[in-house]
Image (spheres, coloured by chain):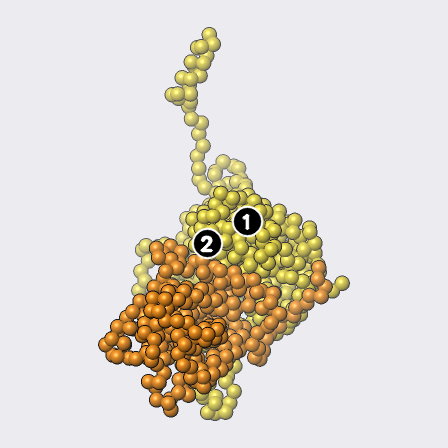
Amino acid sequence: MSAAFELTIRARRGWQAFDLKEVIVYWELLAFLVWRDIKIRYRQTILGGLWAILQPFITMLIFSYVFNRLAHVQSDGPPYQLFAFAGIAPWTFFSTSVTQSSNSLLAQHHLVSKVYFPRMFIPLGAIGALLVDLALSLGLFAGMLVYYHWPLTLAVFWLPVFIVAAFLSAAGAGLILSAVNVSFRDVKYVVPFLVQMGIFVTPVIYPVRYVPARWHLLVGLNPMSGVVLGFRHALLGSPASWGLISISLATSLVLFVFGLLVFRRMEIRFADVI
Amino acid sequence: MKPILEIRNISKQYKLETHRGPKTDNLRELLQRGFNSIVRGTKPTQASGANTFWALKNVSFEVNQGDVIGVIGRNGAGKSTLLKILSRITSPTEGEVKVRGRLATLLEVGTGFHPELTGRENIFLNGAILGMRKREIVRHFDEIVDFAEIEKFLDTPVKHYSSGMYVRLAFAVAAHLNPEVLIVDEVLAVGDLAFQKKCLGKMGEVSRGGRTVLFVSHNMAAVENLCSRAIVLSSGALHFDGSTKDAIQYYLNSLSTQSGAGSVVDLVKVGERRSKAGSLLKRLELLTDADQPINQGIPIGGRLKIKVHFELPRLTDTIHVGVGFNNIYGQRIFTAHTYFEPDLSHKQCVGPQVYSCDIPSFTLAPGEYYLKVWLDVKSIPTDSIEDAARILVLESDFYGTGKIPWNGTCVMKHRWQLDELAGEPVYALQKQVGSEG
């Protein structure tokens, strides 16, 4: 028996981002939860994992027709299809992540009320599993690059940074919304609206130069702006507006830390309220 | 050596939520309160005393390594809250607990099982959720499969399992947890008898192996069998801590004294009430044939009339009243509910009301039974009282044969007769005889 092990259970007060020791102890469980979500997501579907890429692909086709063909939105260089997909891929990851993670605690209330482990693994696990979908759509994107004869540049090495930023943004929003959802079911109505409006507020279908320069700071405060612009820079070699991107990356980091704090603060009452 | 668990002055307060909408579930109200407090410069109001209750109050005890402790008490006594605090599912309002060892909780079998995953996959998932490392699960994998007796269905999604298989697999995973402290709640209430025995055996093995076990159950036989020490909780407080035998005796005695005795029970005073709208249930009358009050008890198969008096503060319709009979172990034996009564009109009413129930033949076996009474308004549980009254069923000549029935939980009128052997078997017998001759 480990005499050194001693744990004190008492009412937790104040703000705390996370308990590193606990995260290390339970690390494997997070992996299991991600693995479970991947396993069950496409069970009993005919198309299976194809759904992961079908959705952004069809969105891209429709957007290309409506915004490029009909509304003459420009892409500033690369074919509009590539331009749109480079934005839709991270956006789909973000919107699906927020939708699924915000509902995750309620959907798995039995885990919250019957067993203990770091609760943040529930929303984070849902998002982790969606990284696989993102990887699949990046695979499709590689195929599209070949089809359109558009070469990759060295900028592609920036991609991991922006994938991390996409994860942080989704996790920040997901942590806050899932925690609030336990007490206030209003979240159920907020999320679809947020996701629907978000795609227009974020420069997914139009280049950021369409937005007047005086609004750029505001665009930067949207954490997904930096991710979308960054994806375009990394995947298509589009010129990057680093000022805007760095503001946006900072925002996603702040959002993530804020999400952790809010979640940890609210999780104390989860089992009593859910 | 320091105790493995030290529970010091643990209290847990819950906010009562009314059906108008729990205080916290209304974002608008919360924002308004927050806004008001900012404007007025006062602190947001804490939940007032009237809207809160203490599920646990100043509970302290110590558990040494290797102790196997039973936790007993009626529904609502605070057992589950205590276990949830020890397993860190919820945090105490006051006090603290020191845990000196790896602790695992089993509040429910099969927590986190996913119906779409196979048995094999669920072993890993459930193991991880209960706190096992992957290599531990791999090491115990074959034992788990053996214990659960599901080899053939290992790669079938568990949604196709029978409930028995499901429970066996779930318990098998849990039984192979290797914690220093194991907390078990009522999990043995499921599964068939043979498997229950196996689980009890496994738990006995665990405790003999020097592990510390906290076992919560209504099954007094299981508690007596497994535990060397037991604590009794009542209304959130620790009432008894000592040998299992004494604890069970204490518990059974407290049941008898706390429940109303006699034939007219003032429901405002007895039992444990859970109410959303104040004390609506007022009085309970227990009568025998010819409306005589019950004094000593009723004979097996005797007539029992129950009158439930309650009061409705405002015009209400669709009211249902139920009376449940629990045995001394807290298991429900029989429920009489107005829901099953086709001839009852549910017109609107207000003020004092009486529902009466007539049971022509009360056929439970001799023993003590505890009545739970409850009132539902529009299918919403509105007022309920656990252990509102006690009924004694007395040994009597139910069958009219001068013999007293024994054994079992109920009696039924039945007939036995010896059937004349006819047809095939007799013919076969004759043939056999014939062939011999």
Instruction: Indicate the chain coloured yellow by its letter.
Output: B
Q: In this view, does B129 lie to the left or right of A88?
A: right
Which residue is pictured at 50% across the width and 85% down the height? B44
Residue A122 location, x and y as percent?
Answer: 49, 66
In contact (CB < 8 Å): disc 2 and disc 1: no
SS type, badge 2: loop
> Which residue in the protein does label 1 denote?
B367
Task: Return the mark for residue B117.
Answer: 2
Instruction: Classify 10 Å Cα crowding around label 1: few (below 14), some (14-19), many (20 and above).
Output: some
Q: Residues within 10 Å of mark 2 (few under 14, many from 20)?
A: many
Percent of width and height locating residue B157: 44, 50
The amino acid type found where label 1 is placed reads: Gly
Residue B188 in the figure: left or right of residue A202: right
Q: Nearer the viewer, residue A149 or B329?
A: A149
Identify the chain of the residue marked 2, using the numbered disc in the image: B
Q: State the image coordinates of residue B404 (x, y, percent, origin top left).
A: 53, 40
Q: Earlier in the sequence, mark 2 or mark 1?
A: 2
Q: What residue type is labelled 2?
A: Leu
